């Protein structure tokens, strides 16, 4: 798998699918159906929003996800370091571990996002 394909698959499965899941959950779950206090509060908050505010909320959720994925790719690429990190990460694919795919993941991801 090429780095571009890896980034696209991560973007689809984590970003696009999760935002869709959140939209579906918020739109199809009643407060009385939630057992978790966090979800009850979130659903009550969502219920007070008009349609424009709901769309803004999902834009915020999406942007937070974009930032999080970008930051993670930055760590994997070596652009950003974790506290006490002494060595670089090497992300490989395949049984032989010879095909390195990190190094430009964050740039690839952000380019795809710009094009959207």
Image (spheres, rainbow, N blue to C red):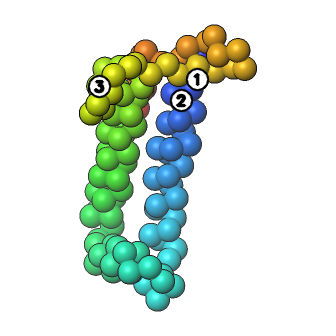
Q: Position of residue 93 (x, y in %)?
A: 63, 21
How many C-alpha atoms fall within 10 Å of the one at disc 1: few (<14), some, or many (≥20)?
Answer: few
Q: Earlier in the sequence, mark 1 or mark 3?
A: 1
Looking at this rendering, what residue extends furthest in the right direction? 95
The answer to whether residue 31 is left or right of residue 42 is: right
Mark 2 vs mark 3: give the one in front: 3
Tell me the distance, in whole angstroms, between the alpha carbons under discs 2 and 3: 21 Å
Q: Residue at x 29, y 75 (%)?
A: 45
Which residue has dot 1 on it? Answer: 5
User: For residue 104, which numbered disc appears in the image?
Assistant: none
Tell me the distance, in whole angstroms, between the alpha carbons under discs 1 and 2: 5 Å
User: For residue 8, which numbered disc appears in the image?
Assistant: 2
Whether residues under marks 1 and 2 lie with C-beta atoms below 8 angstroms apart, the answer is yes
Helix, strand or loop at mark 1: helix
Q: Earlier in the sequence, mark 2 or mark 3?
A: 2
Can residue 69 be spotted in the picture?
yes
Q: Residue at x 50, y 77 (%)?
A: 29
Mark 1 vs mark 3: give the one in front: 3
């Amino acid at each position: 798998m090429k780095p571009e394909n890896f980034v696209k698959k991560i973007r689809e499965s984590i970003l696009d699918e999760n935002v869709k899941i959140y939209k579906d959950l918020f739109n199809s779950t009643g407060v009385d159906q939630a057992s978790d206090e966090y979800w009850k509060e979130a659903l009550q908050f969502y219920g007070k929003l008009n349609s424009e505010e709901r769309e803004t909320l999902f834009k915020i959720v999406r942007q937070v996800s974009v930032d999080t994925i970008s930051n993670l790719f930055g760590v994997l690429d070596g652009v950003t370091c974790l506290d006490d990190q002494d060595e670089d990460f090497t992300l490989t694919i395949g049984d032989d571990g010879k095909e390195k795919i990190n190094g430009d993941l964050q740039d690839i991801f952000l380019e795809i996002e710009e094009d959207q």
